[in-house]
Amino acid sequence: MPTPSPAPSAPAGEARVVFRIDSEPAEATVIIDGKRRGVTPLRIALRLGTHRIELEREGYDTVRAVVEGTPGQDNHLRLQLERSR
């Protein structure tokens, strides 16, 4: 079976760090550095460095965080969404 090639967004040799992003409630849209990347729960490899994370869900206030992951460690981000008033 052939080895899958790396994703186009992950150039060969670029340092990566894996994040687990969770929210309460789940199924919030995850926006990383201005781009929609999926919904919670989400496991994603990002380039090494600082990233802006936003979580959005209808009926809830947007939650924002700035993160910098550590290679080889469990980089787990869990955010609580508050109902909009």
Image: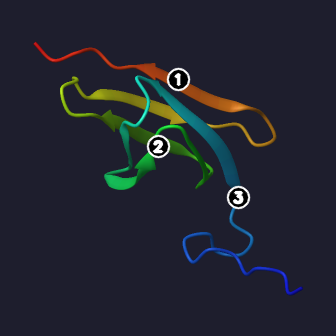
Pick the front one: 36 or 59: 59
For discs 3 and 1, the disc positioned in front in the rendered view: 1
User: In the picture provided, is 4 more to the left or to the right than 23?
Assistant: right
Pick the front one: 24 or 19: 24
Tell me the quarter of the image containing the C terminus.
top left
Q: Taking 3 as reference, is 15 above or below it? A: above
The reply to whether discs 3 and 2 touch (Cβ–Cβ < 8 Å) is no
**Residue found at the far right of this picture:** 1
User: In the picture provided, is 45 more to the left or to the right than 4?
Assistant: left
Q: Secondary structure at mark 3?
A: loop
Q: Where in the figure is residue 31, as x and y percent of width and height?
A: 36, 46
CA distance separating discs 3 and 1: 23 Å
Mark 3 residue type: Ala
Residue that label 3 marks = 15
User: In the picture provided, is 74 more to the left or to the right than 84?
Assistant: right
Q: Taking 35 as reference, is 28 above or below it? A: above
Residue that label 2 marks = 51
Q: If you read the primary sequence from the N terminus, does the residue marked by circle 2 or circle 1 appear first?
A: 2
Q: Residues within 10 Å of mark 2 (few under 14, many from 20)?
A: some
Q: Taking 85 as reference, is 54 above or below it? A: below
Residue 55, quarter of the rendered image: top left
Tell me which residue sits at (55%, 28%) in the image. Answer: 77
Q: Secondary structure at mark 1?
A: strand
User: In the picture provided, is 16 more to the left or to the right than 30?
Assistant: right
Tell me the quarter of the image containing the N terminus.
bottom right
Residue that label 1 marks = 78
CA distance separating discs 2 and 1: 15 Å
Q: Where in the figure is residue 83, as x and y percent of width and height?
A: 22, 15
Q: If you read the primary sequence from the N terminus, does the residue marked by circle 3 or circle 1 appear first?
A: 3
Tell me which residue sits at (68%, 65%) in the image. Answer: 14
**Residue found at the far bottom of this picture:** 2
Tell me which residue sits at (54%, 35%) in the image. Answer: 21
